[in-house]
Image (tube, grey):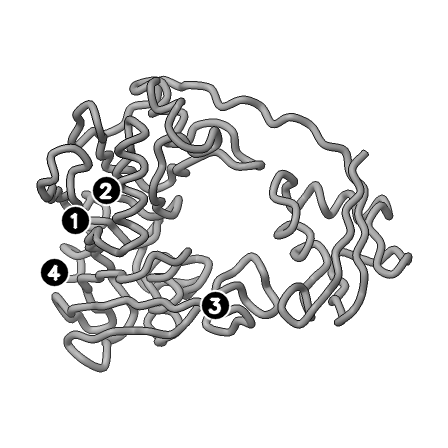
Amino acid sequence: MPKKEYKVTPLSGLDQRLDVFLSEKIKNLARSQIQKIIEEKKARINGFARKSSYRLKQGEIVEIEYKTSEPERIQPEKIPVNVVYSDSFIVVIDKPTGMVVHPGVRNRKHTLVNALLYKFPEIKEVGPEERPGIVHRLDKETSGLIVVARNKKSYRELQRQFRLREVEKLYLGLIWGKMPEKEGTISWPIGRHIKHGERISVKTKKPKAAETRYVVKKEYKEFTFLEIRPVTGRTHQIRVHLAASGHPLLGDMRYGRKKPVIECARLFLHASCLSFIHPDTGKRVELFSHLPRDLKGILDALDN
């Protein structure tokens, strides 16, 4: 049975919940599994058992004992996906809202990767076992375009382009209220929330540079339709930047308002355009996806 030991420092764990701290350290255990281990008193702080909600203090030593098991192998699944573009090097998918991109500890089935392994089995040999072919991600709630590598050459080249910010991404989103300018840039650093580690926030002890540009496309009485271009690609970046500016996306149940004045069953954020250099031809590829019918219906209702 593995036994791990961690020291709490100002840069790692200080004032963080015990369960959140351990879930960040031990990636192959779900937070619910860690909470169960804590309840069984197999996680201790300076030799004493504590609750999951215990806030860590500087210099404390956290010990944990747990059983490990091999995660279930990712299985191909016959799930319909909308292929926008495909050749022997890459495939671009128009992902629907509600679909997770790749399996995790809690979710081994019904992801985009499960569907891709069925339709394009060769990606199994491309990249990490848990994320074959995946060079970038979209949130579960976000719909739109995502490019996947079909061979190792494409995987390395697309990774390079994303790392050097050579890939251009354009999103469409509907926010609460009105932005102060018709176009602008939000450049607040973001990272894990100082107390709620499962959330991303501008209130963080480990800030990472983040930049989001926007252009107002249309203003309504209570909402604004935006064209959004993330320069960096941080987790939840667009959602966090807009929420921190006081204008969260409609339908954002994590960072936004819980009671919308109009019906919106999902996050109003769509990856509408994706542009990158083809890893084999060297020519720029630019692909588009129309706003999904449910989101367009909301705009139509606002127009009327």
Residue nearer the viewer, 58 or 114: 58
Lower position in the chain sequence, tag 4 or tag 1: 1
- Classify the position of the C terminus by image quarter: bottom left
State the image coordinates of residue 119 (x, y, percent, origin top left). Answer: 30, 19
Residue holding disc 2: 145
Q: Mark 4 against mark 2, which lies toward the viewer?
A: 2
- Classify the position of the N terminus by image quarter: top right
Lower position in the chain sequence, tag 4 or tag 2: 2
Q: Is any part of residue 98 visible from this angle?
A: yes
Q: Secondary structure at mark 3?
A: strand
Residue holding disc 4: 304
Specify few, some or many for label 1: CA neighbours under 10 Å numbering under 14, 14-19, or 20 or more: some
Q: CA distance from mark 4 to mark 2?
A: 29 Å
Lower position in the chain sequence, tag 1 or tag 3: 3
Residue 201 circle label: 3
Q: CA distance from mark 3 to mark 2?
A: 25 Å
Residue holding disc 1: 273
Lower position in the chain sequence, tag 2 or tag 1: 2
| Residue 226: quarter of image | bottom left
- Which residue is depicted at the point 40% across and 65% down? 240
| Image-based side of 188 in relation to 66, left or right | left
Q: Secondary structure at mark 2?
A: strand
Q: Mark 4 against mark 1, which lies toward the viewer?
A: 1
Residue 35 circle label: none
Instruction: Say if 141 sits above or below 6 in the image.
Output: above
Specify few, some or many for label 3: CA neighbours under 10 Å numbering under 14, 14-19, or 20 or more: many
Q: CA distance from mark 1 to mark 3?
A: 26 Å
Label 1 is placed on what type of residue? Cys
